[in-house]
Image (cartoon, rainbow, N blue to C red):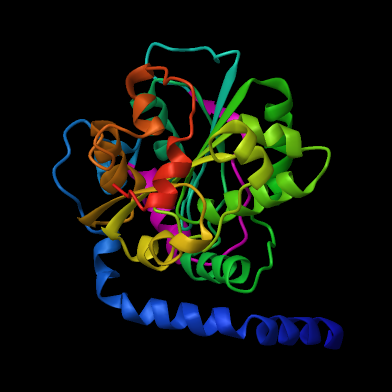
């Protein structure tokens, strides 16, 4: 017990500057907290997390709300085993696998709703890697521990082996992550790049962070130079008035690799209600991003040096 307490005390001391930084950021953007989960603009055709009609039953709504509010240890419904298919498409693409990692406070019905909506918008099967909610308070504590105190905990471990297997078996892997999922992805990328047995696989990985709360994301300079684009390939999408994006990606552009697309006055943090419709329309990027080129089942062209140039020149959408 004393040994563990000493470890935590040392972690607090070693990361005290990050703690003060995050407290300052959290307080400076606090006015946008209420808008995180407020209904967004009327987006036709989208299955919003806030709509009762998006769920199969009232029981799913009650379960999602209860798990958000009540602290408890819960199991994941899918650690890379459950696939959500778009309408009229019931098979995997052989050369490419799509995965989704959810954000904090996400009960199973909401995670399934998110993954299904991604599958519908991009017309591709999406494999869910579900990080279960242990209650919003514990989820926040877990995110702070992972991001600010640099202790991975339970977040990235379930997803790492799933993605390594997919990278070994496929020509390309697309990972879409939301909110806390960006923290998970940052740890996964770091582990992949630092292991000699997996480093070469990262050139197959495309990473799309939506409303990301991570404060850093590294790429491999040598692989990036050889490929002409960041390795892994990375894009970020952020609402300028999204509280978690404000304290996440938008406050850490210098330490986060990839192109950042931002709508400065757009509010909200929910994936379906506040992000996916605008991504599908190309609002964030003037239809230039690679993720937009996947919408409705399209196939984007080869990746080039544009992502690196945009990052260096500060061409954020």
Task: Tell me the residue at 33%/55% (across/down).
Answer: 269
* Left or right for 301, reference 172: left
User: In this view of the protein, which residue sits in the foreground, 158 or 230?
Assistant: 230
Vertical arrangement, residue 234 with respect to residue 86, above or below: below
Is 312 part of what is drawn in magenta? no
Say which quadrant the N terminus sits in.
Answer: bottom right
Residue at horizontal 66 percent and vertical 69 percent from the top: 150
In the figure, 244 relative to 8: above or below? above
Residue 297 pos. (x, y %): 38, 17
Any magenta on residue 70? yes
Q: Is residue 117 left or right of residue 263?
A: right
Q: Is residue 159 left or right of residue 239?
A: right
Q: Quadrant of residue 15?
A: bottom right
Residue 267 in the image, given as x and y percentages of width and height:
23, 57
Q: Measured from the top left, where is residue 127 in percent x and y?
A: 55, 30
- Residue 180 visible from this viewpoint: yes
141 or 240: nearer the viewer: 240
Q: Nearer the viewer, residue 55 or 273?
A: 273
Q: Could you tell me which residue is drawn at 55 percent across and 34 percent down?
A: 228
In this rendering, the answer to whether 109 lies above or below 83 is below
Q: Where are the magenta residues, as a range? A: 58-84
Q: Position of residue 188 (x, y in %)?
A: 66, 48
């Amino acid at each position: 017990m004393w040994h563990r307490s000493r470890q935590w005390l040392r972690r607090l001391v070693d990361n005290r500057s990050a703690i003060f930084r995050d407290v300052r950021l959290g307080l400076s953007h606090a006015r946008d907290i209420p808008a995180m989960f407020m209904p967004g603009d009327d987006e036709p055709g989208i299955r919003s997390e806030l709509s009762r009609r998006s769920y199969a039953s009232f029981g799913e709504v009650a379960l999602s709300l209860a798990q958000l509010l009540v602290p408890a240890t819960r199991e994941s419904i899918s650690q890379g085993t459950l696939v959500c298919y778009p309408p009229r498409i019931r098979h995997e693409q052989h050369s490419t696998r799509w995965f989704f990692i959810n954000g904090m406070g996400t009960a199973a019905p909401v995670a399934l709703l998110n993954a299904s909506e991604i599958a519908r918008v991009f017309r591709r099967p999406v494999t869910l890697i579900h990080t279960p909610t242990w209650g919003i308070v514990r989820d926040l504590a877990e995110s702070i521990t992972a991001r600010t105190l640099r202790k991975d905990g339970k977040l990235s471990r379930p997803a790492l082996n799933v993605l390594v297997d997919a990278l070994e078996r496929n020509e390309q892997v697309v990972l879409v992550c939301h909110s806390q999922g960006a923290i998970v992805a940052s740890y996964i990328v770091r582990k992949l790049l630092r292991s000699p047995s997996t480093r070469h696989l990262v050139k197959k990985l495309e990473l799309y962070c939506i409303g990301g709360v991570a404060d850093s994301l590294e790429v491999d300079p040598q692989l990036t130079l050889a490929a002409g684009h960041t390795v892994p390939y990375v894009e970020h999408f952020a609402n300028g008035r999204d509280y978690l994006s404000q304290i996440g990606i938008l406050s850490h552009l210098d330490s986060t690799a990839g192109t950042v697309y931002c709508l400065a006055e757009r509010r909200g943090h929910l994936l379906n209600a506040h992000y996916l419709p605008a991504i599908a329309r190309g609002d964030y990027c003037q239809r230039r991003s690679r993720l937009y080129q996947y919408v409705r089942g399209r196939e984007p062209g080869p990746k080039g040096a544009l992502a690196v140039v945009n990052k260096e020149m500060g061409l954020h959408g």
